[in-house]
Amino acid sequence: MNPDIVRERQNATFDVEKLTNILDGGPEKTKRRREIETLVLHDPDFKEEDPNFLSRSERYDQAVRKSAQMILKLREYGIADPDEIYCYKSMVSCNQHEAMGLHFAMFRPTLYSQCDNQQAKIWLPLADSTQVIGTYAQTELGHGTHLRGLETTATYDPATQEFVLNSPTVSSIKWWPGGLGKTSNHAIVLAQLHTLGNCHGLHAFIVPIRDMSTHEPLPGIVVGDIGPKFGFSEVDNGFLKLENVRLPRENMLMKYAKVEPDGTYVKPPSEKLTYGTMVFIRSMIVGQSAQALSKSCTIAIRYSAVRHQSELRPGEPEPQILDYQTQQYKLFPLLATAYAFIFVGQYMRKTYHRITGDINQGDFSELPELHALSAGLKAFTTWAANSGIEVCRMSCGGHGYSRSSALPDIYVNFTPACTYEGENTVMMLQTARYLVKSYQRAKNGQQLSGSVSYLNEAEHQRLQPQPVAARPTVVDINDLASLVEGYKLRAATLVQIAAKSIQQELQHRKNQEDAWNNSAIDLVRASDAHCHYVVVKLFTDKLGEIGDTAIHSVLSTLALLYALHGITQNSGDFLQAGLLSVPQMMLISARIKELLSQLRPNAVALVDAFDIRDKKLNSVLGRYDGNVYEHLFEWARRSPLNSTEVHESFHKYLKPLRAKL
Amino acid sequence: MNPDIVRERQNATFDVEKLTNILDGGPEKTKRRREIETLVLHDPDFKEEDPNFLSRSERYDQAVRKSAQMILKLREYGIADPDEIYCYKSMVSCNQHEAMGLHFAMFRPTLYSQCDNQQAKIWLPLADSTQVIGTYAQTELGHGTHLRGLETTATYDPATQEFVLNSPTVSSIKWWPGGLGKTSNHAIVLAQLHTLGNCHGLHAFIVPIRDMSTHEPLPGIVVGDIGPKFGFSEVDNGFLKLENVRLPRENMLMKYAKVEPDGTYVKPPSEKLTYGTMVFIRSMIVGQSAQALSKSCTIAIRYSAVRHQSELRPGEPEPQILDYQTQQYKLFPLLATAYAFIFVGQYMRKTYHRITGDINQGDFSELPELHALSAGLKAFTTWAANSGIEVCRMSCGGHGYSRSSALPDIYVNFTPACTYEGENTVMMLQTARYLVKSYQRAKNGQQLSGSVSYLNEAEHQRLQPQPVAARPTVVDINDLASLVEGYKLRAATLVQIAAKSIQQELQHRKNQEDAWNNSAIDLVRASDAHCHYVVVKLFTDKLGEIGDTAIHSVLSTLALLYALHGITQNSGDFLQAGLLSVPQMMLISARIKELLSQLRPNAVALVDAFDIRDKKLNSVLGRYDGNVYEHLFEWARRSPLNSTEVHESFHKYLKPLRAKL
């Protein structure tokens, strides 16, 4: 064990294990998590070479092997709870993705939720036994977010009782679905349904794409891998071109909408039913943001504790990097953010399950709120984690660029979350639509509930942008409750500014759509402020649940840092809204420096509490024992370019070159 | 040609060719650049497969081949001017790096500048004929920025007149030098020189590391590649462990410092001589920031012109992404930044050459200013370009994640510039040291010159942070000269705040070093504001040189956008310093929206003016003809995972799995 990191752990003021329990949701959960992780840790089947040493094809091969093994092992161990499966898979996949992820995350759930009884009898056993391996093919080469823009067609032919599927243009080729390129033999294809001369919009079809025995593509199917990407090297995201592919009528998923044998279209009873999955996945992504940032902070903070560099005082030995104020200023606000996002993730999961219960009893009243919140928070947390990972990486000096640090892998495998499951700017605008609607309702005297209820107060207080000095400042910078209030009023102000911008645009122009587009900058800003408020509030709320004094104290420091740092990053908003004064801004800067010093002795303990095992972290810089340099050297020597002392290029190019000069 | 992009070009209000000439520095330069680029374009030796389809070893192999070919071809064509060589090599390397880059960028220049006459006669011909291929080995596994911390030793043995070189610890292993792992047979090694019992600090030694005929590592040398990285896949960054390696005395570079045969150490005449190279390289990096951002904007803006998505008005066809305000808000400020950085890069090169002339005549007076400016601007521009590339990438939706977009390659190959040649935070603090010193001098009544002369004015005006409303606002938001003034006063305020923080710390604590460290956040902020001021000023100055009315108009719009956008991103600073009022901030937001609309018709023409050829851009999304989707499909089909229809993993894992379930 590196002596620096031992000393760090001795200096901690709180019990790390107790904090880990809080993060897991109780000591029993910690115990069970560790049991599951240990299963992977001691399993020789999951000992493997660093994927960074392998070619793309070898990485894919290894990932398919692991996917297949996981299916068998999960059955063998009887692990069936979704959270436990997630925990097991995360430990196996480390910083990479699962090759067969979409089969489990999208293909099977869609079959379960959208097959009618007869279809379920046929397809579920096939999917469960992996006779059928599937994916979910929605996006197309030229179409993503906007579902009505999708071009793939499914035209019903009553004569043969078949659908004819086509990709009529290059831009309509299905593109991006995970597992589509090489792994799947079936895909659920979303296509515009045409029957009896009418188009009824997008519907889902089960399309066989490869022969179940030979795995060769079927006639009319052009399928393959979309090529190397930034991350997701283990996954064969694929393309699919459909050329007059004929499907029996029974291959349309018919639990809700139907096409009768004669071609008559039967509408689904409700449109809201597909809403839930999106909300669930976006809520999950909030947790993944927290996870990616926790890993990155663990690596950067542990390495900053053992890395010595430059000098603070002449003649003295090089200090730990973590003693530099600039390093603390880079990392501790991110550490605070990681904690904040963990608590937000817990809240989102809990809320999702509560509201799902309501929905199952026919109560849809909270769904719009949850939908808006999950969209905005998905964008807010992924953007913050995305840039935070890179700050962590760059805080590690040169070695942050080495694949051995794991930070490049964490980044490239996380960053797509900013785009998939709802592009972030689009997500922010969806939340903004809800906020502006709520603002209008409040203005019309309606009483709002949930996270937007502050818009009622704002209306009462008639917030107006006006010269700063003319308004009393309202925030006590040392009081979290008061800071939450400040964030709330900032959000209210920005929602109001956005709503007014739309109004002004309407006065100058003709239509609603242009007014919306010409206010989009303000709308995104309002959503961002709303989400920021929610995060500060949920972090503060969480403190109320913490009984242990020492942990309460350190988490309060983190929460205060999170809130004050957020203010300095957006100081113009708070000054403009008259929520804080210029002298208060100066005090906040000074207070942040104090908080950094206060957190310094607990920094390593705070990342230890995330309890991310070395195997899962897979980072030479983030090792629990702090023995970084020996292992970096050892890792480099294993690198494939070192398998021979002399690379063939010497004989091919360098030696001949001399003769020519 | 895609009709959307044709229409964009028809709508431009200025002559693209004329703007290209301005960026190149004149029509003759444009012509010559294109001649050189065309040499590469039509050279069948440089037709190659996308490196993203190759393994690491194949990529390295291909890069060595190209390096060797370039040496021959540059001789054949008689291209010897450094700028022209740079242009040729950029075209060959596209978004990747040159395998033998360090031989030309560091090894040979160091030999040229630090060999004494006798050494020059031996080593220069060997290096020029590539008998000797070398690199520059400074950083160590545990040591980067702080040169005094380097541990490698060179101990002189008068008995044999040899130096004995050692890596005494794991952390002292040389680490990171490009070309060290596999390519080089020599390295210039920086080591602590010990002779006659005294240590004289770092000196440079020519160390043979591989046999010149067999290329096998020599005795006592442990050398290899440091393993895969985030980018730089073509480069064999290496490690070097020295185990009692004996070198003849003549292998120490002796132009300045010397060791006599009896071990007597002779000091170099001046320390300042090595200063210049750093300044030069950092100035070059400013230009590279501009280049990376220009490429990224070219890709993102062209693709946004041909990509259609979602709907603005119900029932109408999907609009070009570039018509969304949020997309304009992401991309146009970056486009403005790219232009700003090009002009800053031109200024830095010019200033470097001017001051180098002065230095050669013994006048060192401007060197500290240039040193401080190049350090800060290196950090300021690389950070901005670094995050800007990612904004461009994420503005391309899913396809920005495809390696075919080139954006991942541009990012991973550019981001190390934030760390190498001076870690950015360290750079900002170096500039801050100069600013604080200058501030003290101004306070003591000294008249300052150069970019910091405003600190004199600031002292006259006795700037004080005080309630915003109590001070008159000074900035006219539509006047660039006035905005430059605003940025200047912001910088002055922040320098003052940082200086005062140090003073306050000194009053509370004992030593200068802690006071400095406890003010580091303020110091970085002050440097950042200083650099921001310089960039706004240089962009504005450049406009004065532009005669063409149409180009002057569009560049003025860009400059105004750059300045106003910077204010909104740092609005707290301007409000706190009382430079702008709250109502002005609202006006700025509105003005920015107008500027975005104004730039919209010229966006494609403005990136066309960068004149980056398709071959060099190597991006499916950024193609000049806008025919994106056909080529994306074609690229994907060539991907190695598609070389067989059925991947072997099906037979190895998936088929057997079924039998077990």
Image: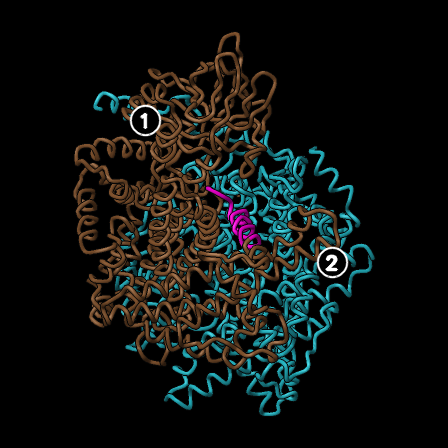
Chain colours: A cyan, B brown
Q: Secondary structure at mark 2?
A: helix
- Left or right of A463: which side holds B290? left
> Is A19 located above or below residue A248 in the figure?
above
Magenta: main secondary structure equals helix
Residue A395 locus on image (x, y percent):
56, 47
Which amino acid, by three-letter code, is at mark 1?
Ser
| Tags 2 and 1 on a common chain | yes
Which amino acid, by three-letter code, is at mark 2?
Leu
* Residue in front for this viewpoint, B188 or A179: B188
- Left or right of B343: which side holds B369? right
Q: Chain of mark 1?
A: A
Which residue appears at 30% of the width and 45% of the height?
B94
Can residue A200 be seen here? The reply is yes
* Residue in front for this viewpoint, A584 or B493: B493
Q: Which residue is mark 1?
A: A649
User: Within the image, what quadrant is residue A633 found in?
Assistant: top right
Give the label on residue A345, or none. Answer: none
B431 is within the stretch colored magenta: yes
- Left or right of B148: which side holds A131? left
Q: Quadrant of the C terminus of chain A?
A: top left
Q: Residues within 10 Å of mark 2 (few under 14, many from 20)?
A: many
Q: Secondary structure at mark 1?
A: helix
Q: Residues within 10 Å of mark 1 (few under 14, many from 20)?
A: some
Give the label on residue A555, or none. Answer: 2
Q: Earlier in the sequence, mark 2 or mark 1?
A: 2
Which residue appears at 68% of the width and 60% of the height?
A592
User: Within the image, what quadrant is residue A153 found in?
Assistant: bottom left
Residue B108 locus on image (x, y percent):
35, 30
Can residue A243 be seen here? The reply is no
Q: Mark 2 and mark 1: span between their CA atoms?
A: 56 Å
**Bounds of the magenta segment:** B421-437
User: Within the image, what quadrant is residue B254 found in?
Assistant: top left
